[in-house]
Each structure stands twice: as C-alpha cells, then as structure tokens.
Image (cartoon, coloured by chain):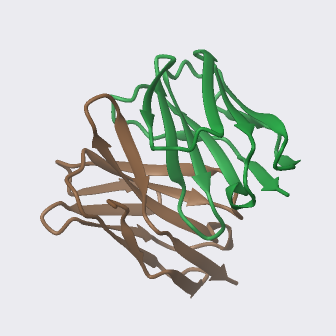
Amino acid sequence: SQQGEEDPQALSIQEGENATMNCSYKTSINNLQWYRQNSGRGLVHLILIRSNEREKHSGRLRVTLDTSKKSSSLLITASRAADTASYFCATARNTGTASKLTFGTGTRLQVTL
Amino acid sequence: DTEVTQTPKHLVMGMTNKKSLKCEQHMGHRAMYWYKQKAKKPPELMFVYSYEKLSINESVPSRFSPECPNSSLLNLHLHALQPEDSALYLCASSQDVRVPYGYTFGSGTRLTVV
C-alpha cells in the first residue's frame, strides 16, 4: 500500500502553542495535500504543495516537502481551540488515466484552552 | 456554489435492501470520487469518475454500483450489503483528474447495515 504514515497519531497542546505533524510516504508523487476533518464529517482541503516545491505558507499554516526523504510536515502556528480536528496528509499520483489521492493515517489534534 | 451536497446524511439499511447515496456539485468540476471511511481510519478510495466516465475502480465489490448520470451528479447504488460495509461514505469533486487541485468533499453519508 502507498498509504502514508503520520506521526504523532495524537497530539494535545494548549491554545497559543504551535502544532507540528509529520507525514511519510512510499512512492513518487505529483503533489501532497493536507486536509482537516472535524468529528468524522467531511474533509476540508487546507493546502497543496507540488513535488517541485519545498515550502508553502497559507495563513497560520506552513507546509514543507522533502521528496528525497519522502516526507512532509504541517505546522500550525498560534493554535486555537477551533483547530481541534483530525489532520490527514494525502499524496496524489498519476496512474495514466487519472490521479489517485491516497490518505495517510492521520493525526488527531486536541487544542485546550 | 462551492459545495458538494450528499444525501441522505444518515442511512440504516437491512442486508436485503437496495438503497442509493446521492452526491451533487455545481462547481463545474469534471472529476468526482467516492471514498469509504471506517471509524478512526483514513478515507479509502473506491471510484473515480472523469468527464462522467468511470476511470478507476479500486476492486470494489459489485454490491456497490456507481453511476454518473451527468457532470453534476454522482450516485452510489447499494445492494445486499454486509454489516462490515457500515462506514462513512464520502463524495468529493475536483476540477479535473489530470490537474493538481485540492478536492472538495461533501459531509458524507453515515451508513449502518443491520
């Protein structure tokens, strides 16, 4: 399986602290994406980083990608209680007919007041 | 309209029932997807539709039958399901399967098979 592994599986921090989640994957990719999921409902797309990019920012989010190590990290700065959710990395790979998006195992983030 | 709408939100069905899940988007996206998610697990790809044609079937059992009547609608027909098929079924869309854009997901249908 090309499913990515994320660590930590769970992370508990206080409001205002930074949260870092890591993702490792096994095959070559076209891009890597991060999603947030609240309470087992739909996923929300956060950010996409292409395979030829090394770092990307969006608001309080910072994503890095190291294709030589097949790894990515998501940093959420100045966390808020509303950031409490599960976060998934997802790798996109072309199969010839379509691009497949495969999700990692996820990190459950708890931000307390 | 920047949403993917899934109906119903909850569904309980017996193993001999036939039911359908519906997904609709009006963003002009030409790629649509079905994912299955078990509790505390990541979503798993089931089907990919590109320009209303089935592009990828991830070896899904035939008791799941997808259908794309037009570019805005995606259905998943269910028949003779097993209790282990109970899960959250997520629909998603993107602009094009060949272009690296993020997916827009619906809120899902929580299916319970009894």
Q: Position of residue A51 (x, y in %)?
A: 21, 49
- Quadrant placement of the C terminus of chain B: bottom right
Q: Which of the 4 quarters of the picture holds residue A64?
A: bottom left
> How many marks can you see?
0
Q: Position of residue B44 (x, y in %)?
A: 51, 53
Observer-nearest of A58 and A53: A53
Observer-nearest of A9 and A102: A102
Instruction: Tell me if residue A106 comes above or below residue A111 in the rendering.
Output: above
Q: Which of the 4 quarters of the picture holds residue A30?
A: top left
Observer-nearest of A1 and A14: A1
User: Residue at image x 66%, y 67%?
Assistant: B39
Q: Residue furthest top?
A: B70
Q: Position of residue B9 (x, y in %)?
A: 82, 45
- Quadrant placement of the N terminus of chain B: top right
User: Residue at image x 31%, y 54%?
Assistant: A56
* Colour green, chain: B
Q: Is residue B101 left or right of residue B62?
A: left
| Chain A palette colour | brown
Q: Position of residue B60 (x, y in %)?
A: 53, 44
Instruction: Tell me if residue A8 comes above or below residue B77 in the rendering.
Output: below
User: Residue at image x 16%, y 69%?
Assistant: A69
Observer-nearest of A110 and B12: B12
Q: Residue furthest left?
A: A68
User: Residue at image x 53%, y 83%?
Assistant: A11
